[in-house]
Amino acid sequence: MADDDELKALSHYPAGIPNPATLGFIPISMIGRPLTPAFPELPAVAERLGRAVRETDDDGFERELLAAAIHPDGVYYAWVESRCKVTGTFVDIDFQICTAGPDGEEYRRSIETYNPYFGCDVQHFAWHGDRLIAIYREKHRTYAFRLSLGAELDDDGWDDGDWDEEDDYDLSAWEEDGSFIGITDEWALLADHLVYVPYKLDWVGVLPLGEVARPRELSVEEARAEGLLPPGFDELVESRKQ
């Protein structure tokens, strides 16, 4: 990790990770994660938005693009953005998933999270055909998000601090208009499926990328028979026996 002087030159949430030099902490699950976003289409999406990847707006909020993906048609694009302002001991922070098309912004929604204060580590963000797939880690768990091309939603701008209120989306099934599903920290994308396994490695969760469906929970033997074991699964099992 960078030294304190280098960290202090960064935002409060570089790449969505709480900055230990300015906020005084970093979640255990995010220690060692890169503090520079690793999505190559960030500059191109920032240019389309007419802004920098990281900037401070007129209201004093840090605005930073954490992830970006341009649809294969070259028209639609998507990004994850943070918005943060620290006033004394109060941290006003929100993370949103957004998309835009030929007529401008189409979709904007705050992420599902226990508390945005603990960050948003975006681990995957890409178009899979006409569906946007995002995978990120918050304080307690990893979430997968899916959105169909052309879906529209605007949740009236940035979160106003009521992030702990219940939302109206189902956390247990893919929908077409934007769905969050809690998965495990160990996951992989295999062909048209997202697969994930618990720490004990005694079952395999399976989500089809292109269907409205609830996750299937397979035994290890069933997943092996269907070719849905994550790469390196057997090696991981052996390492945890040691």
Image (cartoon, rainbow, N blue to C red):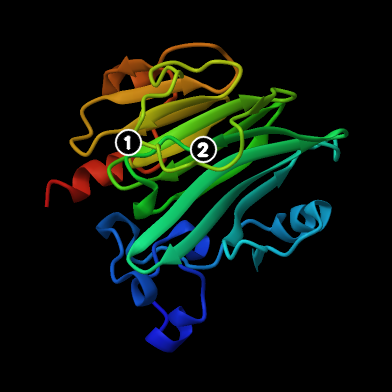
Residue under label 2: 110
Residue located at (42% from left, 25% from top): 228
Q: Quadrant of the N terminus?
A: bottom left
**Residue 38 seen in the current view:** no
Mark in front: 1 vs 2: 2
Q: Nearer the viewer, residue 67 or 228?
A: 67
Furthest residue to the bottom?
5
- Could you tell me which secondary element the residue under label 2 belongs to? strand
| Residue on which disc 1 sits | 184
Q: Residue furthest left?
A: 242
Q: Residue at x 42, y 13 (%)?
A: 214
Q: Is residue 239 left or right of residue 231?
A: left
Q: Give the image location of residue 238, x and y in percent.
A: 20, 45
**Circle 2: is it few (<14), some (14-19), or many (20+) Cα within 10 Å?**
many
Residue 44 in the image: state x and y as whole percent.
Answer: 79, 56
The secondary element bearing badge 1 is classed as: loop
Q: Position of residue 191 (x, y in %)?
A: 57, 29
Q: Is residue 171 above or below residue 111?
A: above
Q: Nearer the viewer, residue 173 or 56?
A: 56
Q: Residue at x 34, y 58 (%)?
A: 30
Is 101 above or below relative to 38?
above
| Kind of residue at disc 2 | Ser
The amino acid on which the numbered mark 1 sits, given as a three-letter code, is: Thr
Residue 66, image quadrant:
bottom right
Give the x, y percent position of residue 162. Answer: 40, 37
Give the mark nearest the N terminus, 1 or 2.
2
